[in-house]
Image (cartoon, rainbow, N blue to C red):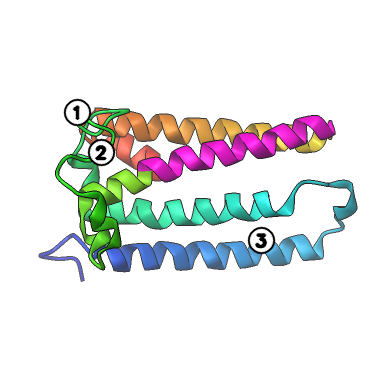
Amino acid sequence: GLVNRVDVSHYRLSLHLVTAFIILSIVFWKFLQLTDLKINQISIRLFSIKLFLFLIFLQLVIGAFVSGMDAGKIYNTWPLMGPSYFPDDSKILEFLSIDVFDNPSIVQFMHRNIAYLIILVYFYIFYFVFILGNRKLLISITYIGLALCLQVFLGIVTIISGVKIVYASLHQI
C-alpha cells in the first residue's frame, strides 16, 4: 500500500507500535509466570517499577509521533530547543489543546522531557537496588541503565545531526 505515499499518520504509527509492544509484554509476562522465579527475593518499590514501565511505553508512543511527523527535524539543538528550553514557535497553553499531538514542536519537547523523567526514575530505582545489595538485580539494573544511556545518547546525536538516517534508525532500533 505504500507505493505513491511512503508516510503514514503518526496516530496509526504509534498505535501499531504500542500494539506490538503490548503483545510482546503479554508474551513476556506469561513466560515469567511459567518460570520458577523466587519473587520474594526481590524487594523494590513496586510503584516505581510500574511508573518506569509506564513512562517507557509513553515514550514509545511519543517517539512514534516524533517519527511520524518528522518532528526531529524542527529543532536540531540540544539541550535547548533553539534559543530556549521550551520551543519558541509554541505556547504553553497549547498543552491544553486537543491538537497538542499534532504540533511537532511540542511532541519533540514531550519526547525530550519524558526521556529526562525516565532517567530520574531509573536512578531512583537504581538507588534502592544498590542499597539492597542484591547482586543479580544490580547487574540487571546496570544493563538497563547502560541501554538507557545509549538510547539517550543516540537520541541526542540524532537531533544534533539533523536526523541523519543512520542515527535515527539506530535510535529507533
| Residue 60 position in % (x across, y down) | 43, 53
Q: Is residue 38 above or below residue 12?
A: above
Whole-number angstrom distance, CA of label 1 to CA of label 2? 25 Å
> Of label 1 and label 3, which has the lower sequence position?
3
Residue shown at 71%/32% (left/top)?
127
Q: Residue furthest front?
A: 93
Whole-number angstrom distance, CA of label 2 to CA of label 3? 31 Å
Q: Amino acid at mark 2?
A: Ile
103 falls in the magenta region: no
129 falls in the magenta region: yes
Q: Quadrant of residue 173?
A: top left
Q: Which residue is mark 3?
A: 28
Q: Amino acid at mark 3?
A: Phe
Label 1–label 3 contact, CB within 8 A = no
Whole-number angstrom distance, CA of label 1 to CA of label 3? 43 Å
Magenta range: 112-133
Q: Which residue is mark 1?
A: 83
On the question of residue 173 being in view, the answer is no
Q: Which residue is mark 2?
A: 165
- Say which element carries label 1: loop
Q: Amino acid at mark 1?
A: Pro
Q: How many marks?
A: 3
> Of label 1 and label 2, which has the lower sequence position?
1
Q: Nearer the viewer, mark 1 or mark 2?
A: 1
| Residue 40 position in % (x across, y down) | 89, 53
Residue shown at 62%/34% (left/top)?
123
| Residue 35 position in % (x across, y down) | 82, 59
> Of label 2 and label 3, which has the lower sequence position?
3
Describe residue 157's horizontal placement relative to residue 51 as left or right.
left
Residue shown at 66%/49% (left/top)?
48
